[in-house]
Amino acid sequence: MLIFFGKPGRKRRDALRAVGLPPIQILLPDMHHARFAEECRRQALIVAAADAADHNLWAFLNDVLADVGAAGKV
């Protein structure tokens, strides 16, 4: 990941602006924060519950696995 600070960073940002690329800022969660793992687990459980309840998804995945298995035997 590139992080531009100071004069070199300003020069790079100015060059990007000159070609029409506006500066952006991407905020990321602090993975070292005590609640990060807890929040990841909470969201993973929500996704897992939604996937388990989606019978169309399971049918699709089974069809894909059958196709992959059939393709591997050729």
Image (cartoon, rainbow, N blue to C red):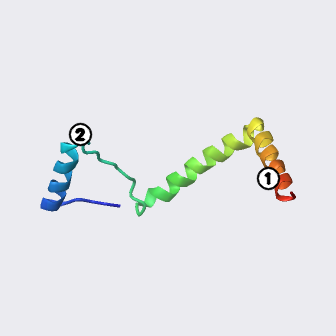
Residue at image point 31% right, 60% down:
2
| Image quadrant occupied by the C terminus | bottom right
Tell me which residue sits at (15%, 55%) in the image. 11
User: Which residue is tagged 2?
Assistant: 20
Spot occupied by residue 3 in the image (x, y as percentages of width and height)? 27, 60
- Amino acid at dot 1: Val
Above or below, 29 relative to 23: below
Compared to residue 68, the image places residue 21 above or below, namely above
In front here: 12 or 31? Answer: 12
The residue furthest left is 7
Q: Is residue 59 left or right of residue 38?
A: right
Using the image, tell me which numbered label, if any, was put on residue 27: none
Instruction: Sort mark 1 into few (<14), some (14-19) or many (20+) by Cα contacts within 10 Å.
Output: few
Q: Which kind of residue does numbered mark 2 sit on?
A: Gly
Give how far across and how far down residue 16 sits, in percent.
22, 48
Look at mark 1 in the image and give the residue it sits on: 68
Q: Nearer the viewer, residue 71 or 36?
A: 71
Crowd tier of the residue under label 2, counting other residues whose Cα lies within 10 Å: few below 14, some 14–19, many 20 or above: few
Residue at horizontal 53%, vertical 53%?
A: 40
Q: Nearer the viewer, residue 16 or 38?
A: 16
Residue 56 position, x and y percent, is: 76, 35
Q: Position of residue 38 (x, y in %)?
A: 52, 55
